[in-house]
Image (spheres, rainbow, N blue to C red):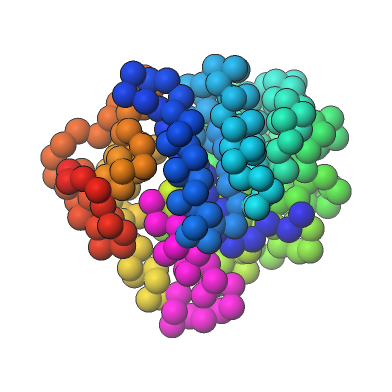
Amino acid sequence: MQLSGSICALATPFTADGALDLEACARLIDYQLAGGTQALVVAGSTGEAHMLTESEWGRLLAFALEHVRGRVPVLAGTGAAATAASVQQTRRAQALGADAALVVTPYYVRPTQQGLLRHFIEVAEHGGLPVVMYNVPSRSGCDLLPETAARLAGHANIIGLKEARGDAARIAAVAPLAQPGFAVLSGDDASAHDAMLAGMQGVISVVNNLVPAAMRALCDAALRADRAAVERHAAGLAPLISALECAPNPIAVKAGLAALGICHAGLRLPLIELEPGAARARLVHSLAALAPVASAA
């Protein structure tokens, strides 16, 4: 499997009373596929994976796989703080039919680089699925360094890296790791266009939930190295990407999905809904410039 282009880190819709909303999940998946999204991540951090029970996690992934019907790859978020737990969750995803696992660096426990090396090898060799490593130090509290990622890139069952550090130095360090069978993907919407122009092969995106066609156009332009088109598309997306930063992910993206009429804006505690006000109005205004909204802020 060679992942590339616009990949959506799907939000998980809930009903007004907090239950899984699989009808809204179907609407969101259909919206992504109609917009040209090239792969989907289910139950990642944007999908509030840590707010789901084990049963809900399985129901959500099974439903998404059934609804997608193989039209694009589906990656399951299977990362955990403990290596054994991540292996177990990856095996569950494999049994349900996922195409690959997105495995975040172990959070809170702050492993060493050698610990990270052994962690990802263990999941790759015993989880039953191809592994995409996910580095997001701002959330996990540890940083998978480029030299460690380079050592892991040679493993036959590790097929990619999602790098969420968007600084120029990190982009320059990890982009050259891209090769046939190993994709280097941006995990930062604001710098994704620069990352792809530097050699990364796509983006696992949050804003993609709201504007899949616009993100596909940006990715297509970047992967064909059309710098003028990239700058044009990036400039059009920048206000919305900036507006999403008003609250921790996925609070704002849920508000945007509600404005589009796709799902309810609610989240599970300790995350709370984005309140009406200037930030929400700015979000809806920037979204309306790119997609027809169904409701006002």
Q: x, y (%) of residue 187? A: 53, 51
Residue 142 found in image quarter = top right
Q: Residue 57 location, x and y as percent? A: 58, 24
Please tell me in which quadrant of the rendered image residue 81 appears. Answer: top right
> Which residue reaches farthest left?
277
Answer left or right for 131 relative to 126.
Answer: left
The residue nearer to you, when weighing 253 against 104, is 253
Apparent side of residue 85 relative to residue 292 in the rendered image (left or right): right
- Which residue lies at the image location 51% right of the left edge and 21% below the top edge? 52
Q: Quadrant of the N terminus?
A: bottom right
| In-front residue for pair 87/260 | 260
Residue at the (59%, 57%) spot, across then down: 38
Q: Position of residue 216 (x, y in %)?
A: 50, 64
Residue 228 placement, left or right of 145: left
Q: Is residue 210 above or below residue 197?
A: above
Residue 240 visible in the displayed image: yes
Q: Toward which corner of the image does residue 14 lie, by quadrant?
A: top left
Magenta residues, start to end: 210-230
